Amino acid sequence: MTKTTRHLLAGLLTSTMLTGAAFAAGTHPVTGEALAEDQTFTYRVLDEHSSVDPQVVEDVSGSEIVRDLFEGLLSQDEEGNLVPGVATGYTVSDDKMTYTFTLRDNAKWSNGEPVTAQDFVFAWQRAVDPELGSPYAWYMELTSVVNVAEILAGDKAPSELGVKAIDDLTLEVSLSTPLPYFPQMVTHATTFPAPQAVIEAHGDQWTRPENIVSNGAYVLTEHKPQERSVRERNAMYWDNDNTIIDKVVALVINDENVALTRYLAGELDRTEIPAGQFPRLQKEYPAEAISFPRLCNYYYTFNLTEDGPEAFQDVNVRRALSLAVDRSIITEKVLAGGQTEAFSFAPVSIANFTPPASEMADMSQKERDDLAKQLLAEAGYDSSNPLSFKMVYNTSEAHQKVAVAMSQMWKQKLGVQVEMANMEWKVFLEERGNQNFELARGAWCGDYNEASTFLDLLQSSSGYNDGKFASERLDELMASARTSDDTQPIYAEVEGIIATEVPVIPIYHYAGVYMMDSDVGNWPVNNVEQNWYSKNLYKIAK
Amino acid sequence: MLAYTLRRLGGAIPTILLLIIASFFLMHMAPGGPFTSERPLPPQVLANIEARYGLDQPLWKQLWDYLTNILLHFDFGPSFKFKDRDVNDIIAQGFPISLTYGFLSFLVCTIVGVSLGVAAAIKHNSWLDYFAVSLGIAAQALPNFIMGPILILTFTLWLGWLPGGGWNGGQWQYLIMPVIALSTSYIGSITRITRSSMLETLNSNFIRTAKAKGLSTRTVIWRHAMKPMLMPVVSYLGPVFVYVLTGSVFVDLYFSTGGLGQAYVGSALSRDYAVLLGVTILYGMLTVLVNLATDLAYAWLDPKIRY
């Protein structure tokens, strides 16, 4: 079997040039900035994390901690590009179904044991083991590793998973279908290694600070649930000499306004800016209020089943409603945090795909409004027979503001009568998932930086396609994209279908809107997935 | 008195049982479950998880298992959200925190409220009376969710004296704001009740008699007026104690103390059934016990009540 070899350049890591001695001098070895005496990074999290078990964690704040505690095969740099993690590189077979990863020989667990290919095999088998019942087992299904579905269904044993340790430093992964973006997927926590002996010794409690053994740049040293968790430098980490931040503290602060106050009082290095406050803070603290694109979209979905309103079956009605939403008012006046108007479903910031310029994007809002009026009239709705429906969103001040703005636009421009309703999150999910809605809010953040993580959602078989949009052509295209080398034209056609059929109304693409202390160096604002690693940060002396 | 105590204790058990059963079914009636998520889990994965937590069993069986586990093993079950922790663990970690500043708040509002009320009544219609009354009314208009932001803005942002939240093992700097926020509005009510009760007592016949006997004001107040005056105050303090503990939900969330309130609200939103039920039972039992204690205190203060 001939193999194409692709090696990740270790040179990408500027850190290879660094030496431990440089820090003694108190300056950053690359940028030359003076480093602060106290290298502690303190940030706010909205909620207590669900777990720091890599195979179990399911929330963003937990994953942030896991990325510091554990290291996967590959990691991401500040731009979101792949860089070596435990693996120094990989080869892929011609049929793109077999990936072979070469592991570095100096990777160690925090107890001094070497990290081996077997640790990954154990972790991956564990992730799909019905006995563990991981809420992220579906992620393993997305990776297309051989036998995942059968193991989850209980038809095969976890040991039959398509992952093998050829020797201590060689890991072979077999896929059931070629997946061009497979390497991106191994930067995700679910695929990180797990210490078998520790897990067997401590069971569910292996992630407690007193028990945990991890292979990342940090170890968990303190955890006060609902209050704080602290991670500190792992002396056994292979690249410990080049790590600058000594200690990372995550403080749970449920109220975002309290978090902002505590930031302003100097207790935090980073916090989120509440909706609408960015312009004011940017004026007062120009060096600290930052905004950058995120890999998330925000949209409304039509219920296209029989349970939905009959009017929504008419594409003209859907188009009219989409056209009449002045997205610039929502991004600039309502949210005002650097969000971008959405005319495509996949965010424009996604890697390897540029959404095609849609007809709608090129029109002025006046032209859109005129066309919307015309389309709605053609569909048979006017002042004597006004269109009316109900829109629902999950309870949140920001969602409410957006919904009010949208319903006002429809009312003023098209005479549409909209009833708005908010629902508590779990109720909302249940109602939307059972097609018990007319028009519902939706949002998605990419699981990996590739357009299919968004476009897959509108496949007829997708579990997240709550409007039950069904397009055979779209399904075909998405299936073909999985094996294609050139996905741009395929995804462009998919966006074209979404633009003409309008199963959803894309509203805006998210921005990360933070207050970030100006002494925090190297925050990866260009990493749209916001996969950040504390080991790449540093604190500058004030 | 003993028979009375036992009778009241006996009545508490069915009350708590009823509370558990009602909460259990109400909780399961709420739409969505602990594993409802934005990306619906594949049916097989969901089935695996539900089997792991026994959620695939019929409801009556789940309730039965739950009750027997509590009674036989004092085990309130695992958390569905925090995979490495169980309910006993969550309560053991959060409750002492809520209890600490809850109890401190109770002490503060009782001592300050009763002193102000007594002082106001003794110096009736003096500047002290007006001061105590207006302070009481002002305090009552400042519930904890108003006091929280005022305190943080003043002491954290403006003066920079106190940390804006957290617990840090219960250091005093971290206790001040939660205690003030929680006790302020009760200080108002306690002052008002104490004052009117004291005035009423001071105007009653037996006090006039005591004064007529030539007893000093001090003796009249301490020996004769204090005990009857406390009756309405004590009946109010029982509920206040429970309010201070359960009302700490907001304070926990606002000051991120790591107390039980955060777990309580969080578990309701994430449908973490076991945690929600465990904390409900704890709060329910506290309410029943405190009410019992109030009744016993009442019986001690007024023998007529011992029926």
Image (tube, rainbow, N blue to C red):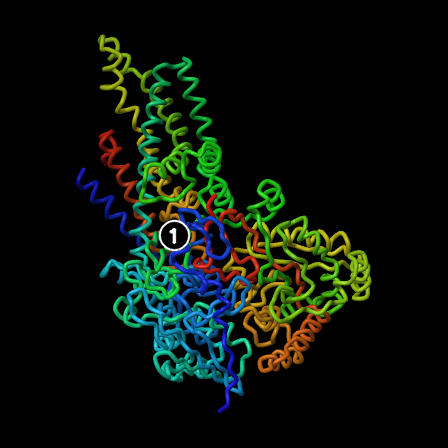
**Quadrant in the picture for residue A307:** bottom right
Residue A391 is situated, as x and y percent measured from the top left of the image, at: 64, 58
Picture layout, residue A210 above or below residue A259? below
Residue A140 is situated, as x and y percent measured from the top left of the image, at: 46, 75
Furthest toward the bottom, the residue is A1
Residue A210 is situated, as x and y percent measured from the top left of the image, at: 28, 59
Residue A450, visible in the rendered structure: yes
Q: What residue lies at 67% left-to-right and 66% top-to-bottom?
A: A344
Query: Between A84 and A506, which is closer to the camera in this rendering?
Result: A84
The residue indicated by pointer 1 is A24
Q: What residue lies at 49% left-to-right and 47% top-to-bottom?
A: A519
Q: What secondary structure is marked by label 1?
A: helix
Label 1 marks a residue whose chain is A
Query: Between B235 and A426, which is closer to the camera in this rendering?
Result: A426
Residue B143, visible in the rendered structure: no
Horizontal side of residue A407 vs B80, given as left or right: right
Residue B34 is situated, as x and y percent measured from the top left of the image, at: 43, 63
Horizontal side of residue A405 vs B258, given as left or right: right
Q: How many marks?
A: 1
**Quadrant in the picture for residue A506:** bottom right
Query: Between A489 and A30, which is closer to the camera in this rendering?
Result: A30
- Mark 1 crowdedness (10 Å alpha carbons): few <14, some 14-19, many ≥20: few
Furthest toward the left, the residue is B2
**Quadrant in the picture for residue A382:** bottom right
Label 1 amino acid? Ala
